Amino acid sequence: MNLYLVLVVAFIAGTACLDVLMEWLNLSRISPTLPAEFTGVYDPERYRTSQQYLRVRTRFGIGVRLVSSFFLLGFILVGGFEWVDEAARSLDLGSLPTGLVFIGLLAFGSSLLRIPISAWSTFVIEERFGFNRTRPGTFVLDLVKGWVLSVVLGGPLLAAILWVFARYPGWAWLMGWLLVTLVSLVMMLLSPVLILPIFYKFEPLADGELRAAIEAYAGEQRFQMKGVFGMDGSRRSSKTNAFFTGVGRFRRIVLLDTLIAKHPVEELVAVVAHEMGHYKKGHILFGWLEAFLSSGVMFFLLSLFMQNESLFQAFGMRHLSIYASLVFFGFLYTPIQEVLSIAGNALSRWQERAADAFAVRTTGRPEALVEGLKRLTVENLGNLTPHPWYVALYWSHPPILERIHRIRAVSSKG
């Protein structure tokens, strides 16, 4: 029995079982009793709806997880990767184009399989609970745009990585690492002005109380930015959110139009203050450095498994290749990535608490942030009582009741 095959099968089956167990544990925490903090905020009917929303999404997610895991295991065991490789090689295009075709076919096939999952989630589940505003035409157009961007942006990067591993095998991991880092930096700059506008419409906030309040707060914090923008999130969903995008003086504050429509000015300023806190506390830079270092480790480990004969035998492959090595290494790296994600989520939750504290101290209005978070939770049918283990494994934000408690604790300390 091939050891790599045993490990890959164990990883796929083990992570699927863990995910399902955690989902069921999370469901076990559902309680019909509304937490006192949300009395008068979550009306009883909407609270029951939020729990039903959690049940429906969880059961759907479990089904998708199990089916996709069985499909992936079957694809591996029947030699699916060898079929795709033979199809790519049959075109007789040369090593690098063959690699692009091989990975492209796998990516396109995976994308096709996700379409019915995404469609059901959007047009059945989200529609049932009143969130969906995506029209079929928008759904299809988004898919096509995503495919085009993958080819236009991902294709050249993948080709460059394949080329350096073929041309400079000894230094390829370092060159690939630096190349990916450079591209990620460029994307951080270009995304707000070239990528996101392909999917969403951005408009500067009109002159008025909200814009004046946000700009005044940003001025107090000496926060340099490109401007404050509204985004037409309502074309796809009624859910609310806000975020920052871009780096340096190209930073933008972005508020979804659904958020602007449902929150008073002081709550919106508190939400913006929280997001600004991530920049002021260095969370964005730290996140970039973390990604930079982890990608370096990943490329170094990849170089150790490049064209490993035993690994190729595990996937039923007859020919060694650089391009397939990239794909197969991903299966071995997944458990490492899972462990890193747990640590990353723990760090992210700590950063969210720090950003909340920053917002409280700089605005002097803790209750504005509390009320804004409550309203966001209710509008998005958020889960008030997640299982602690589920939070530890998957959540990048602390549970809402914990956040409220800590905000008030910071406020009481002055």
Image (spheres, rainbow, N blue to C red):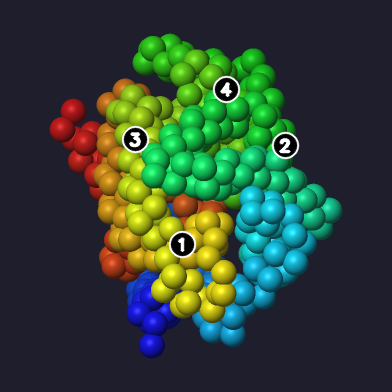
**In the image, which is nearer the foreground, mark 1 or mark 2?**
1
- Contact between marks 3 and 1 (CB within 8 A): the answer is no
Across and down, in percent, residue 251 comes to 51, 22
Across and down, in percent, residue 46 comes to 54, 63
Q: CA distance from mark 1 to mark 4?
A: 49 Å
Q: Quadrant of residue 342?
A: bottom left
Q: Quadrant of residue 57?
A: bottom right
The disc, 3 or 2, on the residue closer to the chain's N-terminal end is 2
The disc, 2 or 4, on the residue closer to the chain's N-terminal end is 2
- Give the numbered dot on residue 198: 2
**In the image, which is nearer the foreground, mark 1 or mark 4?**
1
Q: Nearer the viewer, residue 282 or 160?
A: 160
- Give the numbered dot on residue 307: 1
Report if residue 328 is visible in the image: yes
Q: Nearer the viewer, residue 184 or 53?
A: 184
- Contact between marks 3 and 4 (CB within 8 A): the answer is no
Q: CA distance from mark 1 to mark 2?
A: 38 Å
Amino acid type of the residue tagged 1 in the rendering: Gln
Residue placed under numbered mark 4 in the picture: 228
- Give the numbered dot on residue 289: 3
Q: CA distance from mark 3 to mark 1?
A: 29 Å
- Give the numbered dot on residue 404: none
